[in-house]
Image (cartoon, rainbow, N blue to C red):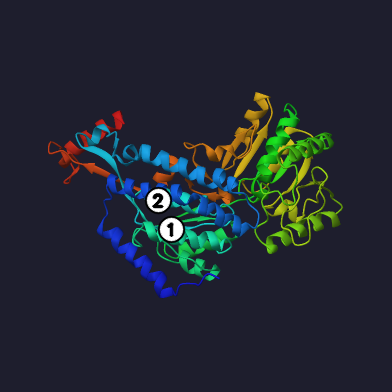
Amino acid sequence: MISSPPPSSLHSLFEAQHRASRAQAEVPLALRRERLLKMRALLAQHGAALAGAVQADFGVRSPQLTEIADLFVLRTLLAGALKNLARWMKPVRVRTPLYLQPARAFLLRQPLGVVGVISPWNYPVQLALGPVITALAAGNRVMLKPSELTPRTSALLAELIGQSFAPEELCVVQGDGDVAAAFAGLPFDHLFFTGSTAVGRKVAAAAAANLTPTTLELGGKSPCIIDASCDLEQAALKIAHGKLLNAGQTCIAPDYVLLPEGREAAFAQAFERAVARLFPSIEGNPDYAAIISPRQHARLQALLDDARNDSARVQEIIPGNGTAAAAGSRQMPPALVFHPAPDSRLLNEEIFGPILPVLPYQSLDEAIAYVNARPRPLALYWFGTDAAARHKVLSRTVSGGVTVNDTLMHIAHPHLPFGGVGESGWGAYHGEAGFLRLTHQKPVLAQSKWARGDLFYPPYGRRFDQVMGLLKRII
């Protein structure tokens, strides 16, 4: 069990970082690069150990999954930051209007100070260190609170970071929900949270007491819209991959499918073939991740039980000659759910597991209306070849991000901001967008010695009226 630090220790860590950030408001390029290179070395030397810790926390999760979904993403993020950091840090010249010339204006990009990061359990390395890397690139000091649901990974992160960084640069705070609540209440210069919408509300409320700005990366119900023009076999394969990566424990996993009425049986068959191709077996397959905890597994089973009790048709998919999961196993087979009740938990809660509701629609307008009647999702996926239909969906729906004819891939693009909108979160990171999110762009106007500012000074009279009359004509 992870021991919780006393409140005094938590505040001492924060105060040390706060003092250091105020003593060094300007963080030079060389120091920022040094910190990023330390992080790159940490991943290079200890990536296998981190993957092993993640596997131990989940029970079943292959190191290859952690390599592609956690470590590769972080290496890409680091490479982009190291390549572009000098350009991102440069002051940005701003055009000065005629009435303020010959002054010049620019934006000075400065660190915010101390950034707090609260990370989740589902991708416990990527979603912990991704915001940390971004914050370090922006010149900030960082305190990280990783999830208590992945204790081995969190403990290893604390050990490795403690070996590579001074605590006033970057430190890890371990502990339970009470520690997380106390952490969220610290007066950070910015607080970055990834997790559920319900917990995000609490984090935002705690931060608001200190007027701490936040970035909230939440979740929600991300739809897949299948157009009549799509190749159903290809769509089913890509949806199955997006849904079953990490056994559905992904914030941007497809949460439900909207497809033309009458194609339910064809989709079910295509999805079943896709599952068999990706995962020839479920039980004992190291590539098919386990549900993180017995509690989460029980919650997902209850969702299926509720759907059956509401007369929905549940189709569990067990590839090959496999059998149902053994007692105590948390490798939950995929399941399609047809005709779930509109008020069911399955359609009103984020699923976060390998269960996929399938909802038929009669017209594309009906599908769009269904999406728009609900909170704005973190991701939206559209499949088809009809350009007019694609434009209709993209222009008439609002979501955090979109991938067309695939799932998940927009998060892998290093130059696309990643974040939510509305109840799926606010603020975005990755690439320059993340750097700017955790940077203060200080506006500076440098007056020229040739300036005639006294034209606008009192006492006001005829000359003032003439100047204002001229300006009214030219602005």
Q: Residues within 10 Å of mark 1 (few under 14, many from 20)?
A: some
State the SS at label 1: helix
The quarter holding residue 402 reads top right
Q: Amino acid at mark 2?
A: Ala
Q: Position of residue 352 (x, y in %)?
A: 67, 52
- Of mark 1 and mark 2, the one earlier in the sequence is 2
Q: Amino acid at mark 1?
A: Leu
Which numbered disc covers residue 160? 1
The quarter holding residue 300 reads bottom right
* Image quarter in which the C terminus is found: top left
On the picture, is 263 further left or further right than 14?
Answer: right
On the picture, is 198 further left or further right than 125?
Answer: right
Provide the residue designation for mark 2.
135
Q: Residues within 10 Å of mark 2 (few under 14, many from 20)?
A: many
Q: Residue furthest right?
A: 311
Q: Position of residue 415 (x, y in %)?
A: 47, 36
* Image quarter in which the N terminus is found: bottom right
Is residue 368 visible to the viewer in this orientation of the structure?
A: no
Residue in front for this viewpoint, 446 or 378: 378
